[in-house]
Image (cartoon, rainbow, N blue to C red):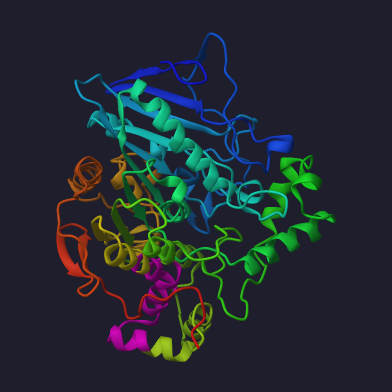
């Protein structure tokens, strides 16, 4: 297959052809480590694209406490310079161009890759979609602000991948004017940032935000604290020029030590609750940029999981013996009046155990409130349609405590619930078999939205806050939340 940089050879599979490790930008090494992505150099002859290539430098993250997360984080760091690549699953040739879906992985902006078995796109190709999964810069190279380098370099990488798709995807059978960008967790936050970026106009035609937030960006002051911490660890001025030759291994090791950086400022909380030292760095939150109309006006499917926070709580035993002080500490991370917030959640969930309240408070602070803000901003200020969902199927992993936690929806979206690593008492989907048709139906719904702009239910209206609740059965229901759609900014 011919691309703008040269010819690539893929590998046939049951539903079409897979192309793995295809470069969309030049290697981010040396002076280019902190620079904007640049076009990849051309090559002569045919480049094999039949096996996974290198991934971004990152710490190893196979587990969250007792939970095996290896299917989510994949192979970890596969060393190699040429890691700004994408993987393509192209369906069999058809008479008309196929819809294109471009996926951005999660991993807290510090880990993960497009090379996970969980993100195998064969089911998309089977159903007539060209799936593209993207590797981008992570951690310090991707998201640490530096005075002599552009911010949000990992997001610039995704934009470069989208431009590559515009220039090349027709050769793989895809339609460059029907491109759906979707992402999960950190990848979903990147999608919200792109939806608020004027540079994305014409590159994205629909978008899906899975368990992300439009209020997850750091302020300049917060990000600068992380930059200063990196400089202290390296004992040098944290600039692109001074850091150009520092080994990747050193930067990865420093990343492990940044979790203790306090990002609470006079007028802002840590917008992601301390789960990562990196995020987008913006003057305003993506939800506010969406409301201002600064990015592409495209149909949006946005949602979260019923018990997002259980991923961060259950594997570490934090849902056992939860007391009032635990609730107050959790509320204080995101609200100036924690006691009032706790009582608000109690009133909204009569008879709920403290563990359920803790999960709800943390989950809303991380993803729920930001999902609401994103949906409301888009539905109120954009002419395109907004659709909302809530994923509620309960995994029985970790003795039944995992539930509808963060990441549990992914195997259903990719129709990959059969992967062995997803099953077992410490695995993401637990020991009980999921409903027979849940993966098929959810996967088809994502494809229907990418193809038509309508997932199959009525658009979201902020006044009613109704969404599709996805579980063993599907039904339209009001989103359950005891808190308003708060931002990371403190209230007076």
Image quadrant in which you'd find residue 176: top left
Residue at (50%, 85%) from the top-left corner?
328
Q: Quadrant of the N terminus?
A: top left
Vertical placement of residue 20 versus 343, above or below: above
Image quadrant in which you'd find residue 340: bottom left
Q: Position of residue 254 (x, y in %)?
A: 72, 53
Residue at (31%, 76%) from the top-left corner?
481
Q: Is residue 401 left or right of residue 439?
A: right
Q: Is residue 172 left or right of residue 451?
A: right
Q: Residue furthest right?
A: 235
Q: Is residue 113 at all visible to an observer of this figure? A: no
Q: Is residue 48 at all visible to an observer of this figure? A: yes
The prevailing secondary structure element of the residues shown in magenta is helix
Q: Nearer the viewer, residue 382 or 439?
A: 382
Q: Residue furthest top?
A: 45
Q: How many marks?
A: 0
Give the residues in magenta. 344-372
350 within the magenta span: yes
Q: Position of residue 405 (x, y in %)?
A: 37, 61
Q: Nearer the viewer, residue 397 or 234?
A: 234
Q: Nearer the viewer, residue 312 or 34?
A: 34
269 within the magenta span: no
Residue at (78%, 45%) from the top-left corner?
241
Vertical placement of residue 181 versus 65, above or below: above
Q: Position of residue 324 (x, y in %)?
A: 46, 88
Q: Position of residue 49 (x, y in %)?
A: 48, 20
């Amino acid at each position: 297959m011919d691309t703008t940089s040269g010819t690539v050879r893929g590998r046939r599979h049951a539903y079409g052809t897979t192309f793995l490790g295809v470069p969309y930008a030049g290697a981010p090494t040396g002076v280019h480590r902190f620079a904007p992505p640049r076009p990849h150099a051309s090559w002569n002859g045919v480049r094999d694209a039949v096996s996974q290539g290198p991934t971004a430098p990152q710490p190893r993250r196979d587990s969250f406490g007792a939970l095996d997360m290896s299917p989510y984080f994949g192979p970890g760091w596969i060393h190699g310079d040429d890691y700004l690549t994408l993987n393509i699953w192209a369906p069999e040739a058809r008479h008309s161009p196929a819809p294109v879906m471009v996926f951005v992985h999660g991993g807290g902006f510090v880990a993960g890759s497009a090379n996970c078995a969980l993100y195998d796109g064969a089911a998309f190709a089977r159903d007539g979609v060209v799936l593209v999964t993207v590797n981008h810069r992570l951690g310090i190279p991707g998201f640490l602000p530096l005075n002599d380098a552009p911010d949000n370099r990992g997001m610039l990488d995704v934009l470069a991948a989208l431009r590559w798709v515009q220039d090349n995807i027709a050769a793989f059978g895809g339609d460059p004017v029907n491109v759906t960008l979707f992402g999960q967790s950190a990848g979903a936050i990147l999608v919200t940032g792109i939806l608020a970026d004027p540079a994305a106009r014409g590159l994205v035609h629909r978008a899906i935000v899975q368990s992300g937030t439009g209020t997850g960006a750091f302020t300049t002051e917060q990000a600068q604290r992380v930059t200063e911490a990196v400089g202290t660890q390296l004992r040098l001025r944290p600039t692109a020029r001074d850091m150009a030759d520092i080994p990747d291994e050193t930067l990865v090791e420093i990343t492990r030590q940044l979790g203790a950086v306090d990002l609470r400022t006079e007028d802002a909380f840590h917008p992601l609750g301390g789960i990562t030292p990196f995020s987008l760095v913006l003057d305003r939150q993506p939800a506010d940029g969406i409301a201002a109309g600064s990015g592409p006006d495209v149909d949006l499917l946005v949602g979260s999981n019923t018990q997002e926070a259980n991923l961060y709580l259950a594997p570490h035993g934090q849902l056992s013996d939860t007391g009032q002080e635990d609730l107050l500490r959790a509320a204080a991370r995101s609200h100036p009046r924690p006691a009032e917030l706790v009582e608000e959640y109690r009133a909204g969930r009569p008879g709920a155990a403290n563990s359920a309240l803790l999960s709800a408070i943390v989950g809303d602070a991380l993803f729920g409130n930001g999902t609401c803000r994103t949906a409301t901003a888009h539905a109120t200020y954009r002419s395109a349609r907004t659709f909302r969902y809530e994923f509620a199927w309960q995994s029985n992993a970790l003795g039944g405590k995992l539930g509808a936690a963060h990441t549990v929806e992914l195997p259903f979206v990719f129709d990959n619930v059969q992967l062995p690593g997803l099953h077992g008492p410490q695995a993401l989907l637990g020991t009980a078999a999921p409903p027979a048709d849940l993966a098929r139906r959810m996967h088809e719904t994502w494809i229907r939205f990418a193809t038509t702009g309508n997932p199959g239910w009525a658009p979201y209206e902020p006044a009613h806050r109704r969404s599709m609740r996805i579980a063993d059965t599907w039904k339209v229901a009001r989103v359950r939340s005891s808190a308003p759609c708060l931002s990371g900014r403190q209230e007076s």
